[in-house]
Image (tube, rainbow, N blue to C red):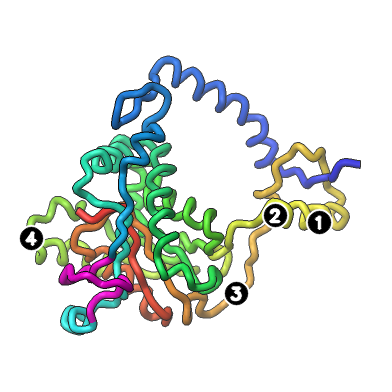
Amino acid sequence: MPPLIILTYKNATLILMKPLLKLTHWCLDLIFPKYCLGCGLEGSYLCPACFSSIPVCLSTNCFICGRRSPSGLACDNCRHKERSSLNGIMVAADWKNLLLRQIIYEYKYRFVKELSIPLSQLMISFLQTDMLLNCPPDKLILVPVPLHGRRFAWRGFNQAELLAQKISAHFDIPLAKNILVRSRHTLPQRTAKTQVARAANIKNAFTLSKNHSSLSSLRAPQKRDDVKSRARKAQWATGLYWGDHIALREAIPRNTTQNLNSLKNKTVILVDDICTTGLTFEDCARALKSLSPKEIWGLVIARG
């Protein structure tokens, strides 16, 4: 007998919409074909050959003074002088690569969400060579840099969150996407011409969300077998069941266990697409510092 799976209205809608979405994408690809941003080959925005031509950074530096740092940590003197709450910033690739710049531009400003896949893969490849991931996944937490509501409405998605979701799924690291909020709208940091102007623009822009104590946003990606197992148990308790072709992930209620300080003694990795001075990460770290994490790191595709 095939396993019986709980059906929800949301899941049923997703199942019915899936063929229509596939047809829509097929029609769009037919009318507006995709071309590789590197070589112009038709079929995708980035072909495998061009993707492999983008090197991943093999060395790490102090994000304040730029000196070589094998561990990626900022110099003790620099951190003390700048009163930094960051332990370091990890940079996956080189901003000098012109193809990488074009990919990031298309992703951020032409809203090509599909490019989150190769960009996140660069970050994953970098992390696979970084000593930081020797830490057990349950001691790590990914926190995407949040967008203000006005910016989110303009772009339609949070580019940092898409990257963090893929990294979370690959390494099975919990993702805390609702722990920080951007409490005020700021101008893009690239528009500020001086370090002082950048600092004033981003100062106190981030705060902890009101429900940051809940573990519901720290849910690690579940394995499919675990989801099915929970569904089989739930179907007999509720009496609601359906065929095994219904997707189940959203039918499982999130863990709502409370924890007064879910970041205490954890290593936090703040995720963003690019950074220049690191001041955005600094303000995020300032807001998170009250939760007593063990370390706070930044992770970006490139630093311009």
Residue at label 4?
194
Marks 4 and 2: CB-CB under 8 Å? no
Can you tell which of label 3 and label 4 is closer to the viewer?
Answer: 4
Q: Earlier in the sequence, mark 3 or mark 4?
A: 4
Residues under numbered marks 2 and 1 in contact, where contact means CB atoms less than 8 Å apart: yes
Q: Residue at x 18, y 79 (%)?
A: 78
Residue labelled with disc 3: 258
Residue 151 placed where, x, y %? 31, 48
Location of residue 186 with respect to 293 vertically, above or below = above
**Magenta residue check for 12:** no
Tell me the distance, in whole angstroms, between the alpha carbons under discs 3 and 2: 18 Å
Nearer to us in this view, 99 or 198: 99
Mark 3 Cα within 10 Å, few/some/many (few <14, many 20+)? few
Name the amino acid type tagged 1.
Ala
Query: What SS does tag 4 mark?
Result: loop
Q: Is residue 49 above or below residue 264?
A: above
Density class for disc 1 (Cα within 10 Å; few <14, some 14-19, many ≥20) is some
| Kind of residue sitting beneath label 2 | Ile
Q: Is residue 191 visible?
A: yes
Secondary structure mostly seen in magenta is: loop
Residue on which the image places disc 2:
252
Q: Earlier in the sequence, mark 4 or mark 1?
A: 4
Q: How much space separates mark 3 and mark 4, taking CA atoms?
A: 43 Å
Q: Is residue 214 visible?
A: no
The magenta segment: 60-75
The numbered mark at residue 21 is none
Can you identify the residue that label 1 sits on? 234
